[in-house]
Amino acid sequence: MRSIGNFFTGTIKANFNLTKQFALLSFFCILIIGTISNYLVCELITDKVLLRDATLSRDFIHSVIASEGTWQMFLDTPNSSTANWPNTATEWALDSFFSHVAMMPDVVRAKVYAKDRSVIWSSDPKELVGENIEANEELDASLKGELIFNSGVIGNDIKDEHKSLLDHKKKGTLFIETYIPIWNKAQSRVVAAVELYRAPRDLQESIIQSQRFIWTGSLCGGVLLFLSLYWIVNRAALVMANQQRRLIRAQSLSVIGQTASAITHAMRNPLSSIRACAEMSLTDDLEGVRESALEIMGETDRMDRWAREFLQFSVINTNSPEYLDLNDLVRTVLKEHETVLDRMAISVQLDMVAAQLPVNANASPLSQVLGNLIMNAVEAMGENGELKISTSLDSHCNHAVVSITDNGPGLLEEIKDKLFQPFATTKPTGTGLGLALSMHLVEHYSGILEILNEPGRGVTATVRLPLLGGPL
C-alpha cells in the first residue's frame, strides 16, 4: 500500500502490483456503486408502479361516483353521533357504491369514512359502522384531498391494523394500502374517503420480474465493465513492464557503450602493431616462428572481434534504412559462412518462402545478427550437425520471419533466463555480447528476437521484422 507521503508525491513502492490493486479497487467500486444504484432504481420503479396503481383505483372510484351521483349521498350522511345513524334509506342509497368498491380486483378489505372520520361502511364484519376512528395521519391527509398509498408485505408489518390481513392472504404477499379522497361534484371540498387494502399478486410478480431484470442486467453490465477495464489495465501493465525492461537494458547498454569506446580505442592500435609484426615473421622459414606468428594472429583476431562487439554497443548504425529482401540477405549470410559450415560438416536445410520479404533496414547490422545466430547454432551442435533455416510471413502477414534451428543439446537452465543480458555466456572464450548485441540491433529496426529452447532437441532463434509497406 502507499504511504501518505507516497500518495501525494506520486511515488509507489517497488512491490506495488498495478493489475492486482486495480482489480480489487475496481471490483469493490463497481460492486458498491452498482448495488446502491440498483436499489435506488428498484425503489423508484416500485414507487412509480404503486402510484400508478393507486391512481387507477382513484380514477375507478371517481368514475363510479360520477356515473351514479354517489357524492350527493355522502353530503347527506349524518354524523356518527346522530341517533338514527345508520338508517335503511342511506344504506340502500350507498349499497351500489359499496358493492363496486368491494368487487374491485384483489381487494382484501375496504372501508368508507365520512368527513368526521366515522366509518360509513366496512367489508370487515368486525368493524362497527358509525364508529369514530382515532387519530390517523393517512386518513387525515386523505380527507384534506391527498392521495395516500403505502405498501408492505403481509406478516412483516408491525401495525396492528395489518395483522388481520393474515386471515385473507398468505404471509409474504405484497399488499397496498390506499386512502382515496372523494370530492363533491364541484371538486371544491372532500366529502368522504375510501380506504382500500389490496393484495395484487400480478402486480407483485411484475415488480419482482422488473427488479430481477434490473439486477441481472446490472450484474452482466458490471462484469463486462470489470473485464474490459481489467483487460485494458493488464495490457497497459504488460506494455509498461516491457518498456521498463527495455529502459533498463538501454541504460545498461549505454554504460557498456561508454566503456567500450574507451577500451576499443586503447586496444586497436596495439593490436594493429602486433598483427603487422606477425605478418612479417611469416616470411621466415623457422617453424617455431611460424607457429608463434599464427598463434599471435589468432589471438589478435579474437581480440579484434571483441573490440568490434564492444564498439557496436557504443555506436548504432546511423545510416538511413533501405529496402532489403530478407531472402536475399539470408542467402548472402549463408554464403559468407559456407567455409565454416563445410569444415564442421554441418548440413543445411533451407526452406524459403517464394514471395519477396521486403524490410526497411541496413544490410550490415542484420547480416551480423543472422551470422551471430548461425555461429551460435554451429558452436552448440559441433561437427555433423543439422541446421534448419526458414523464412516466412507471420499469421497476420505484416512481419517477415527468419527462423534458425539447430539440433544441439539446448540451453542450460542457469543461462536461458539471462540470454540477452550483456556478459552472460557459457563459452570459455566468449564475451557474452552476441545475443545482447543482436537484440539491440533487431529492436533498432522495430523487430523482435525470440529464443525457443527445447532441452535435448535444440534451440530455435526467430527474428521478426516489420514488412516494408505493411501487410502483403
Image: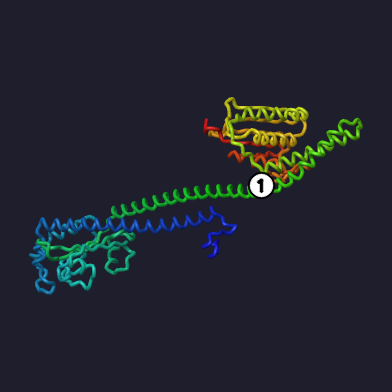
Is residue 291 or residue 408 the one in the foreground?
291
Amino acid carrying mark 1 in the image = Leu
Is residue 413 at all visible to an observer of this figure? no
Q: Residue at x 24, y 56 (%)?
A: 53
- 10 Å neighbourhood of mark 1: few (<14), some, or many (≥20)? many
Q: Position of residue 380 (x, y in %)?
A: 74, 37
Between residue 116 and residue 424, name the one nearer to us.
Answer: 424
Residue 144 sits in quarter: bottom left
Q: Quadrant of the N terminus?
A: bottom right
Q: Read off the residue under disc 1.
A: 253
The percent coordinates of residue 246 (x first, y second) are 61, 47
Residue at figure coordinates x 31%, y 62% from the top left: 152
Q: Quadrant of residue 334?
A: top right
Q: How is the image coloured?
A: rainbow
In the visual, does 38 lie left or right of 240? left
Q: Quadrant of residue 389?
A: top right
Q: How many discs appear?
A: 1
- Tell me if residue 273 can be seen: yes
The answer to whether residue 2 is above or below residue 390 is below
Residue 177 percent coordinates (x, y): 25, 62
In the image, 213 versus 33, the foreground residue is 33
Q: Residue 179, how many percent across, how many down?
A: 21, 63
Question: Does 466 sit left or right of 458 as displayed?
Answer: left
> Which residue occupies the extreme top position in the image?
354
| Label 1 element class | helix
* Nearer to me, 113 or 429: 429
Compared with 110, 267 (above or below) is above
